[in-house]
Image (cartoon, helix red, strand yellow):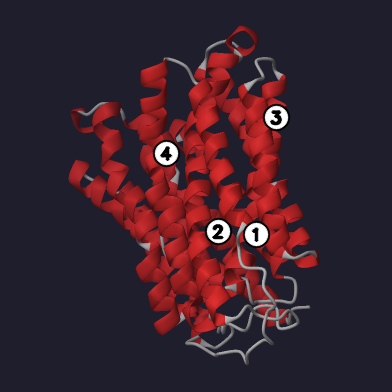
Protein backbone atom coordinates (compact mmCIF):
# COMPACT_ATOMS: atom_id res chain seq x y z
CA UNK A 1 0.00 0.00 0.00
CA UNK A 2 1.03 3.62 -0.51
CA UNK A 3 1.16 6.42 2.05
CA UNK A 4 -1.20 9.37 1.34
CA UNK A 5 1.68 11.66 0.25
CA UNK A 6 2.98 8.94 -2.07
CA UNK A 7 -0.45 8.46 -3.63
CA UNK A 8 -0.67 12.21 -4.24
CA UNK A 9 2.70 12.20 -6.00
CA UNK A 10 1.65 9.25 -8.17
CA UNK A 11 -1.46 11.16 -9.24
CA UNK A 12 0.66 14.11 -10.38
CA UNK A 13 3.06 11.79 -12.21
CA UNK A 14 0.18 9.99 -13.92
CA UNK A 15 -1.29 13.32 -15.02
CA UNK A 16 2.13 14.22 -16.37
CA UNK A 17 2.06 11.14 -18.62
CA UNK A 18 -1.12 12.45 -20.26
CA UNK A 19 0.50 15.82 -20.91
CA UNK A 20 3.78 14.31 -22.16
CA UNK A 21 1.94 12.69 -25.08
CA UNK A 22 -0.78 15.32 -25.48
CA UNK A 23 1.61 18.24 -25.96
CA UNK A 24 3.77 16.24 -28.38
CA UNK A 25 0.77 15.42 -30.59
CA UNK A 26 -0.97 18.80 -30.75
CA UNK A 27 1.02 19.91 -33.79
CA UNK A 28 0.09 17.09 -36.25
CA UNK A 29 -3.57 18.13 -35.96
CA UNK A 30 -3.13 21.87 -35.42
CA UNK A 31 -0.99 22.12 -38.55
CA UNK A 32 -4.08 21.27 -40.62
CA UNK A 33 -5.59 24.59 -39.48
CA UNK A 34 -2.31 26.45 -40.01
CA UNK A 35 -2.14 26.01 -43.79
CA UNK A 36 -1.70 29.41 -45.40
CA UNK A 37 -0.15 30.91 -42.24
CA UNK A 38 2.92 32.95 -43.22
CA UNK A 39 2.24 31.83 -46.79
CA UNK A 40 3.24 28.24 -46.02
CA UNK A 41 1.45 24.99 -46.89
CA UNK A 42 1.24 21.68 -45.05
CA UNK A 43 4.38 20.24 -46.66
CA UNK A 44 6.38 23.31 -45.58
CA UNK A 45 4.98 23.56 -42.04
CA UNK A 46 5.16 19.90 -41.00
CA UNK A 47 9.00 19.60 -41.06
CA UNK A 48 9.21 22.44 -38.51
CA UNK A 49 8.34 19.86 -35.82
CA UNK A 50 11.10 17.40 -36.74
CA UNK A 51 13.67 18.61 -34.19
CA UNK A 52 11.10 18.38 -31.40
CA UNK A 53 10.22 14.78 -32.22
CA UNK A 54 13.90 13.89 -32.45
CA UNK A 55 14.64 15.45 -29.05
CA UNK A 56 11.64 13.69 -27.50
CA UNK A 57 13.60 10.48 -27.97
CA UNK A 58 17.28 11.34 -27.63
CA UNK A 59 16.71 13.86 -24.84
CA UNK A 60 15.66 10.96 -22.57
CA UNK A 61 19.28 9.96 -21.89
CA UNK A 62 20.55 13.26 -20.43
CA UNK A 63 17.23 13.66 -18.60
CA UNK A 64 17.65 10.26 -16.95
CA UNK A 65 21.26 10.98 -16.06
CA UNK A 66 20.29 14.28 -14.40
CA UNK A 67 17.55 12.53 -12.42
CA UNK A 68 20.11 10.01 -11.12
CA UNK A 69 22.76 12.59 -10.31
CA UNK A 70 20.54 15.48 -9.18
CA UNK A 71 16.83 15.06 -8.33
CA UNK A 72 13.90 13.14 -9.81
CA UNK A 73 11.38 15.47 -8.18
CA UNK A 74 12.94 18.67 -9.51
CA UNK A 75 13.32 17.14 -12.97
CA UNK A 76 9.60 16.31 -12.92
CA UNK A 77 8.83 19.90 -11.91
CA UNK A 78 11.01 21.09 -14.80
CA UNK A 79 9.01 18.84 -17.13
CA UNK A 80 5.66 20.33 -16.10
CA UNK A 81 6.71 23.98 -16.17
CA UNK A 82 9.11 23.73 -19.11
CA UNK A 83 6.90 21.78 -21.52
CA UNK A 84 3.84 23.85 -20.59
CA UNK A 85 5.72 27.11 -21.14
CA UNK A 86 7.14 25.82 -24.42
CA UNK A 87 3.64 24.97 -25.62
CA UNK A 88 2.44 28.47 -24.74
CA UNK A 89 5.47 29.92 -26.54
CA UNK A 90 4.54 27.89 -29.62
CA UNK A 91 1.02 29.31 -29.54
CA UNK A 92 2.50 32.82 -29.53
CA UNK A 93 4.79 32.16 -32.50
CA UNK A 94 5.09 35.08 -34.93
CA UNK A 95 6.77 33.22 -37.77
CA UNK A 96 8.16 29.84 -38.86
CA UNK A 97 11.40 30.19 -36.91
CA UNK A 98 9.68 30.96 -33.60
CA UNK A 99 7.21 28.14 -34.29
CA UNK A 100 10.09 25.71 -34.88
CA UNK A 101 11.79 26.93 -31.69
CA UNK A 102 8.64 26.37 -29.64
CA UNK A 103 8.09 22.87 -31.05
CA UNK A 104 11.74 22.00 -30.41
CA UNK A 105 11.47 23.12 -26.79
CA UNK A 106 8.29 21.06 -26.30
CA UNK A 107 10.22 17.96 -27.40
CA UNK A 108 13.19 18.82 -25.20
CA UNK A 109 11.19 19.30 -22.00
CA UNK A 110 8.76 16.45 -22.75
CA UNK A 111 11.73 14.08 -23.08
CA UNK A 112 12.23 14.43 -19.32
CA UNK A 113 9.07 12.57 -18.45
CA UNK A 114 9.58 8.91 -19.35
CA UNK A 115 13.01 8.11 -17.86
CA UNK A 116 12.29 10.07 -14.68
CA UNK A 117 8.73 8.86 -14.10
CA UNK A 118 9.22 5.18 -14.93
CA UNK A 119 12.44 4.95 -12.90
CA UNK A 120 10.57 6.25 -9.85
CA UNK A 121 7.23 4.47 -10.34
CA UNK A 122 8.85 1.03 -10.64
CA UNK A 123 9.89 1.30 -6.99
CA UNK A 124 7.06 3.47 -5.68
CA UNK A 125 4.94 0.65 -4.26
CA UNK A 126 4.72 -3.05 -3.58
CA UNK A 127 2.83 -3.67 -6.86
CA UNK A 128 4.98 -1.93 -9.49
CA UNK A 129 3.37 -3.75 -12.41
CA UNK A 130 -0.10 -2.46 -11.56
CA UNK A 131 1.28 1.04 -10.91
CA UNK A 132 3.04 1.12 -14.29
CA UNK A 133 -0.03 -0.30 -16.03
CA UNK A 134 -2.30 2.44 -14.71
CA UNK A 135 0.32 5.05 -15.60
CA UNK A 136 0.36 3.66 -19.14
CA UNK A 137 -3.38 4.19 -19.46
CA UNK A 138 -2.89 7.89 -18.69
CA UNK A 139 -0.34 8.05 -21.49
CA UNK A 140 -2.81 6.51 -23.93
CA UNK A 141 -5.39 9.12 -22.89
CA UNK A 142 -2.94 11.81 -23.97
CA UNK A 143 -2.13 10.03 -27.22
CA UNK A 144 -5.76 9.39 -28.10
CA UNK A 145 -7.10 12.74 -26.93
CA UNK A 146 -4.51 15.03 -28.53
CA UNK A 147 -6.05 15.02 -31.98
CA UNK A 148 -9.57 15.60 -30.67
CA UNK A 149 -8.57 18.43 -28.30
CA UNK A 150 -6.35 20.15 -30.85
CA UNK A 151 -8.97 19.78 -33.59
CA UNK A 152 -11.82 21.16 -31.50
CA UNK A 153 -9.79 24.15 -30.24
CA UNK A 154 -8.42 24.92 -33.71
CA UNK A 155 -11.88 24.76 -35.29
CA UNK A 156 -13.76 26.66 -32.58
CA UNK A 157 -11.11 29.29 -31.84
CA UNK A 158 -7.88 29.09 -33.88
CA UNK A 159 -4.67 27.09 -34.10
CA UNK A 160 -2.99 29.17 -31.41
CA UNK A 161 -5.60 28.08 -28.84
CA UNK A 162 -4.67 24.45 -29.58
CA UNK A 163 -1.25 25.20 -28.08
CA UNK A 164 -2.06 27.91 -25.54
CA UNK A 165 -4.80 26.15 -23.54
CA UNK A 166 -3.08 22.73 -23.13
CA UNK A 167 0.18 24.53 -22.30
CA UNK A 168 -1.50 26.61 -19.60
CA UNK A 169 -3.22 23.50 -18.21
CA UNK A 170 0.15 21.75 -17.92
CA UNK A 171 1.61 24.75 -16.07
CA UNK A 172 -1.40 24.84 -13.72
CA UNK A 173 -0.72 21.20 -12.83
CA UNK A 174 2.98 21.85 -12.43
CA UNK A 175 2.71 24.83 -10.07
CA UNK A 176 1.20 22.93 -7.08
CA UNK A 177 3.54 20.01 -7.78
CA UNK A 178 6.56 22.32 -7.70
CA UNK A 179 5.28 23.93 -4.49
CA UNK A 180 4.99 20.45 -3.00
CA UNK A 181 8.58 19.67 -4.03
CA UNK A 182 9.78 22.86 -2.33
CA UNK A 183 7.98 21.82 0.86
CA UNK A 184 9.22 18.24 0.75
CA UNK A 185 5.87 16.64 -0.10
CA UNK A 186 7.07 15.14 -3.39
CA UNK A 187 10.57 13.93 -2.62
CA UNK A 188 10.37 11.01 -5.12
CA UNK A 189 13.17 9.07 -3.38
CA UNK A 190 13.73 5.81 -5.26
CA UNK A 191 13.77 2.48 -3.43
CA UNK A 192 14.88 -1.02 -4.31
CA UNK A 193 12.90 -2.97 -6.89
CA UNK A 194 10.68 -5.67 -5.33
CA UNK A 195 12.72 -6.35 -2.16
CA UNK A 196 10.75 -9.60 -1.78
CA UNK A 197 12.26 -10.91 -5.03
CA UNK A 198 15.94 -11.75 -5.27
CA UNK A 199 18.12 -9.84 -7.72
CA UNK A 200 20.14 -11.31 -10.56
CA UNK A 201 23.88 -11.72 -10.19
CA UNK A 202 26.05 -8.90 -11.54
CA UNK A 203 27.08 -10.92 -14.62
CA UNK A 204 23.50 -11.96 -15.39
CA UNK A 205 22.29 -8.40 -14.86
CA UNK A 206 24.79 -7.03 -17.40
CA UNK A 207 23.92 -9.69 -19.98
CA UNK A 208 20.18 -9.29 -19.36
CA UNK A 209 20.37 -5.52 -19.73
CA UNK A 210 22.30 -5.80 -23.02
CA UNK A 211 19.83 -8.31 -24.46
CA UNK A 212 16.80 -6.29 -23.33
CA UNK A 213 18.00 -3.18 -25.15
CA UNK A 214 18.01 -5.25 -28.35
CA UNK A 215 14.44 -6.37 -27.73
CA UNK A 216 13.39 -2.77 -26.99
CA UNK A 217 14.71 -1.57 -30.35
CA UNK A 218 12.67 -4.13 -32.31
CA UNK A 219 9.61 -3.51 -30.13
CA UNK A 220 9.94 0.20 -30.93
CA UNK A 221 10.07 -0.56 -34.64
CA UNK A 222 6.82 -2.55 -34.30
CA UNK A 223 5.12 0.36 -32.53
CA UNK A 224 6.32 2.96 -35.04
CA UNK A 225 5.22 0.88 -38.01
CA UNK A 226 1.85 0.12 -36.39
CA UNK A 227 1.03 3.67 -35.32
CA UNK A 228 2.07 5.24 -38.64
CA UNK A 229 1.11 2.43 -41.02
CA UNK A 230 -2.20 1.25 -39.57
CA UNK A 231 -4.38 3.94 -41.23
CA UNK A 232 -2.97 2.96 -44.63
CA UNK A 233 -3.37 -0.75 -43.86
CA UNK A 234 -7.06 -0.31 -43.00
CA UNK A 235 -7.66 1.93 -46.01
CA UNK A 236 -5.99 -0.49 -48.43
CA UNK A 237 -7.48 -3.72 -47.07
CA UNK A 238 -10.93 -2.59 -45.96
CA UNK A 239 -11.62 0.06 -48.59
CA UNK A 240 -14.65 -1.76 -49.98
CA UNK A 241 -16.19 -1.86 -46.49
CA UNK A 242 -15.26 1.47 -44.92
CA UNK A 243 -14.51 3.53 -48.01
CA UNK A 244 -11.24 5.29 -48.67
CA UNK A 245 -11.68 8.38 -46.50
CA UNK A 246 -8.98 9.27 -44.00
CA UNK A 247 -11.61 9.85 -41.32
CA UNK A 248 -12.91 6.28 -41.52
CA UNK A 249 -9.45 4.75 -41.29
CA UNK A 250 -8.44 7.17 -38.54
CA UNK A 251 -11.52 6.33 -36.50
CA UNK A 252 -10.70 2.62 -36.64
CA UNK A 253 -7.12 3.35 -35.54
CA UNK A 254 -8.43 5.37 -32.56
CA UNK A 255 -10.69 2.46 -31.58
CA UNK A 256 -7.77 0.02 -31.81
CA UNK A 257 -5.47 2.08 -29.61
CA UNK A 258 -8.28 3.02 -27.22
CA UNK A 259 -9.12 -0.62 -26.48
CA UNK A 260 -5.44 -1.62 -26.40
CA UNK A 261 -4.92 0.64 -23.37
CA UNK A 262 -6.49 -2.11 -21.26
CA UNK A 263 -3.44 -4.22 -22.04
CA UNK A 264 -1.38 -1.92 -19.83
CA UNK A 265 -3.40 -2.83 -16.75
CA UNK A 266 -3.56 -6.55 -17.55
CA UNK A 267 0.19 -6.69 -18.25
CA UNK A 268 0.92 -4.86 -15.02
CA UNK A 269 -1.19 -7.28 -12.96
CA UNK A 270 0.52 -10.27 -14.61
CA UNK A 271 3.94 -8.74 -13.89
CA UNK A 272 3.05 -8.57 -10.19
CA UNK A 273 1.95 -12.20 -10.06
CA UNK A 274 4.38 -14.02 -12.33
CA UNK A 275 8.06 -13.97 -13.26
CA UNK A 276 8.64 -11.22 -15.84
CA UNK A 277 11.31 -13.36 -17.55
CA UNK A 278 8.63 -15.91 -18.40
CA UNK A 279 6.00 -13.38 -19.50
CA UNK A 280 8.31 -11.37 -21.75
CA UNK A 281 8.98 -13.97 -24.50
CA UNK A 282 5.41 -15.28 -24.30
CA UNK A 283 4.06 -11.83 -25.13
CA UNK A 284 6.19 -11.57 -28.28
CA UNK A 285 5.24 -15.09 -29.37
CA UNK A 286 1.56 -14.10 -29.11
CA UNK A 287 2.21 -10.86 -30.94
CA UNK A 288 4.00 -12.65 -33.78
CA UNK A 289 1.10 -15.05 -34.24
CA UNK A 290 -1.44 -12.23 -34.29
CA UNK A 291 0.55 -10.15 -36.79
CA UNK A 292 0.90 -13.14 -39.12
CA UNK A 293 -2.86 -13.68 -38.80
CA UNK A 294 -3.40 -10.00 -39.64
CA UNK A 295 -1.23 -10.39 -42.75
CA UNK A 296 -3.60 -13.16 -43.92
CA UNK A 297 -6.86 -11.36 -43.02
CA UNK A 298 -8.67 -9.28 -45.64
CA UNK A 299 -12.07 -9.02 -43.93
CA UNK A 300 -13.28 -6.58 -41.23
CA UNK A 301 -11.94 -9.14 -38.73
CA UNK A 302 -8.61 -7.40 -39.41
CA UNK A 303 -9.67 -4.69 -36.96
CA UNK A 304 -10.21 -7.30 -34.24
CA UNK A 305 -6.89 -9.01 -34.93
CA UNK A 306 -4.96 -5.72 -34.91
CA UNK A 307 -6.70 -4.71 -31.68
CA UNK A 308 -5.55 -7.95 -30.05
CA UNK A 309 -2.01 -7.50 -31.40
CA UNK A 310 -1.76 -3.93 -30.07
CA UNK A 311 -3.29 -4.95 -26.74
CA UNK A 312 -0.58 -7.57 -26.33
CA UNK A 313 2.05 -4.99 -27.22
CA UNK A 314 0.84 -2.40 -24.72
CA UNK A 315 0.55 -5.14 -22.11
CA UNK A 316 4.21 -5.94 -22.65
CA UNK A 317 5.31 -2.44 -21.62
CA UNK A 318 4.80 -2.72 -17.81
CA UNK A 319 6.33 -6.21 -17.97
CA UNK A 320 9.33 -4.77 -19.81
CA UNK A 321 9.77 -1.87 -17.39
CA UNK A 322 9.63 -4.22 -14.40
CA UNK A 323 12.14 -6.58 -16.00
CA UNK A 324 14.47 -3.71 -16.83
CA UNK A 325 14.43 -2.69 -13.17
CA UNK A 326 15.43 -6.26 -12.21
CA UNK A 327 18.69 -5.86 -14.16
CA UNK A 328 19.43 -2.23 -13.19
CA UNK A 329 21.08 -0.78 -10.03
CA UNK A 330 18.85 1.77 -8.28
CA UNK A 331 21.45 4.53 -8.60
CA UNK A 332 21.51 4.22 -12.41
CA UNK A 333 17.87 3.36 -13.02
CA UNK A 334 16.77 6.63 -14.66
CA UNK A 335 19.85 6.66 -16.89
CA UNK A 336 19.11 3.14 -18.12
CA UNK A 337 15.48 4.06 -18.79
CA UNK A 338 16.84 7.08 -20.66
CA UNK A 339 18.76 4.70 -22.94
CA UNK A 340 15.59 2.65 -23.36
CA UNK A 341 13.54 5.61 -24.55
CA UNK A 342 16.29 6.79 -26.88
CA UNK A 343 15.88 3.43 -28.61
CA UNK A 344 12.09 3.12 -28.21
CA UNK A 345 11.21 6.68 -29.25
CA UNK A 346 14.27 7.86 -31.18
CA UNK A 347 16.16 5.19 -33.11
CA UNK A 348 12.98 3.21 -33.75
CA UNK A 349 11.69 6.15 -35.83
CA UNK A 350 13.52 4.37 -38.65
CA UNK A 351 10.33 2.31 -38.87
CA UNK A 352 8.63 5.25 -40.61
CA UNK A 353 10.91 5.41 -43.70
CA UNK A 354 10.89 1.60 -43.66
CA UNK A 355 7.13 1.70 -44.32
CA UNK A 356 7.67 4.04 -47.26
CA UNK A 357 10.40 1.78 -48.63
CA UNK A 358 8.28 -1.39 -48.36
CA UNK A 359 5.18 0.17 -49.93
CA UNK A 360 7.26 1.88 -52.61
CA UNK A 361 9.06 -1.31 -53.64
CA UNK A 362 6.15 -3.77 -53.37
CA UNK A 363 3.21 -1.46 -54.01
CA UNK A 364 1.37 -3.16 -51.14
CA UNK A 365 0.93 -2.87 -47.36
CA UNK A 366 1.29 -6.63 -46.93
CA UNK A 367 5.03 -6.30 -46.43
CA UNK A 368 4.52 -3.87 -43.56
CA UNK A 369 2.60 -6.46 -41.54
CA UNK A 370 5.20 -9.11 -42.39
CA UNK A 371 8.01 -6.77 -41.33
CA UNK A 372 6.25 -6.18 -38.01
CA UNK A 373 5.88 -9.93 -37.55
CA UNK A 374 9.57 -10.36 -38.38
CA UNK A 375 10.53 -7.83 -35.70
CA UNK A 376 8.42 -9.74 -33.16
CA UNK A 377 10.21 -12.98 -34.10
CA UNK A 378 13.59 -11.36 -33.38
CA UNK A 379 12.27 -9.88 -30.12
CA UNK A 380 10.93 -13.30 -29.07
CA UNK A 381 14.23 -15.04 -29.87
CA UNK A 382 16.26 -12.54 -27.84
CA UNK A 383 13.78 -12.50 -24.93
CA UNK A 384 13.95 -16.28 -24.81
CA UNK A 385 17.66 -16.25 -23.88
CA UNK A 386 17.42 -13.71 -21.05
CA UNK A 387 19.38 -14.92 -17.98
CA UNK A 388 17.40 -17.33 -15.82
CA UNK A 389 20.20 -18.56 -13.57
CA UNK A 390 19.98 -18.87 -9.80
CA UNK A 391 19.74 -15.29 -8.47
CA UNK A 392 21.58 -13.87 -5.51
CA UNK A 393 19.99 -12.43 -2.41
CA UNK A 394 18.78 -8.88 -2.87
CA UNK A 395 21.37 -6.26 -2.04
CA UNK A 396 20.55 -3.37 0.34
CA UNK A 397 18.76 -0.55 -1.46
CA UNK A 398 20.92 2.34 -2.66
CA UNK A 399 19.47 5.77 -1.97
CA UNK A 400 20.32 7.99 -4.95
CA UNK A 401 19.53 11.67 -5.26
CA UNK A 402 15.91 12.58 -4.61
Q: Quadrant of residue 383?
A: bottom right
For residue 248, what is the image quadrant?
top right
Residue occupying image coordinates x 38% and y 50%: 347
Q: Residue at x 77, y 60 (%)?
A: 269
Label whose residue precedes the other's in the sequence (1 or 4): 1
- Asked if the residues shown at circle 4 and circle 3 are in contact, with their CB atoms under 8 angstroms apart, the answer is no
Is residue 277 depicted above or below 347 in this figure?
below
- Which one is in front in this view, the residue at disc 1 or the one at disc 4? 4
Mark 2 vs mark 4, CA separation in Å: 24 Å
Image-based side of 122 in relation to 167, left or right:
right
Q: Earlier in the sequence, mark 3 or mark 1?
A: 3
**In front: 101, or 160?**
101
Label 4 crowd (10 A; few <14 / some 14-19 / many >=20) = many
Q: Nearer the viewer, mark 2 or mark 1?
A: 1
Residue tagged by mark 3? 305
Residue position for label 1? 318
Which labelled disc corresponds to residue 351? 4
Residue 254 horizontal side relative to residue 151, left or right? right
**Residue behind mark 2:** 17
Mark linked to residue 331:
none
Going from N to C along the chain, the mark reached first, 2 or 1, is 2
Q: Quadrant of residue 44?
A: top left
Query: Mark 4 or mark 3, which has the lower sequence index?
Result: 3
Pinpoint residue 170: horizontal percent, then vertical percent: 48, 60
Above or below residue 181? Residue 15 is above
Give whichever of 300, 136 is nearer the camera: 300
Amino acid sequence: MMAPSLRSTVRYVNGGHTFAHLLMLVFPTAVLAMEGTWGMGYAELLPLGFAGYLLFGIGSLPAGWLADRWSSAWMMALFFLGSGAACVLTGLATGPWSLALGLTLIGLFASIYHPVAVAWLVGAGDRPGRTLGINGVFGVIGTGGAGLIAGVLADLIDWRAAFLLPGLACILLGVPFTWGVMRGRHAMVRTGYRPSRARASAADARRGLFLMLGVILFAGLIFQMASVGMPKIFQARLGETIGTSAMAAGTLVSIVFGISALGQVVGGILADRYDERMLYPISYALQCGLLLLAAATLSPLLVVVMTLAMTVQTGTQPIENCLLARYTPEAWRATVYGVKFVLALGVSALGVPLIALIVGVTGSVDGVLLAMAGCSVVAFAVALVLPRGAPERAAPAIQPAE
